Image (cartoon, rainbow, N blue to C red):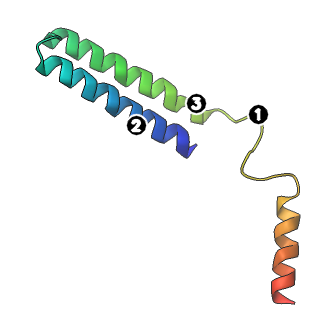
Amino acid sequence: MRSIALQSAIGGMALSVIGMALASGGLLSPVAGAVSQEIIDVLAIFNALRAAFRPKTLTDFGPRAPNAVIRRLGRLTG
């Protein structure tokens, strides 16, 4: 989920910086800049919404991860 948040934040900021560069060069009118910024915001929000859905598989933990952790802790303490 953290990668999705970073992807949305960095992607949105990068696209905004590109839009600002175009606007400062006179290639993007104020109205077109405002509309493109709203589109960038909506795209970032839709991308971030992917984190709201449950993934098909949990990649953080394997099926044996809890047992392996318990065994490792048992070796350390006993």
Which quadrant is home to the N terminus?
Answer: top right
Q: Residue flagged by tag 2: what amino acid is it?
A: Ala
In space, the residues marked 2 and 3 are separated at their CA atoms by 13 Å
Q: Residue visible at 72% across and 51% down?
A: 60
In space, the residues marked 1 and 2 are separated at their CA atoms by 24 Å
Q: Residue flagged by tag 1: what amino acid is it?
A: Lys
Q: Residues within 10 Å of mark 3 (few under 14, many from 20)?
A: few
Q: Is residue 77 above or below residue 64?
A: below
Upstream in sequence: badge 1 or badge 2: 2
Quadrant assignment, res 22: top left
> Judging from the image, what secondary structure is the residue with disc 3 in?
helix
Q: Is residue 24 left or right of residue 1?
A: left
Q: Residues within 10 Å of mark 2 (few under 14, many from 20)?
A: some
In the picture, the disc for residue 50 is: 3
Whole-percent x, y for residue 24 in the image = 12, 21
Q: Is residue 10 above or below residue 33?
A: below
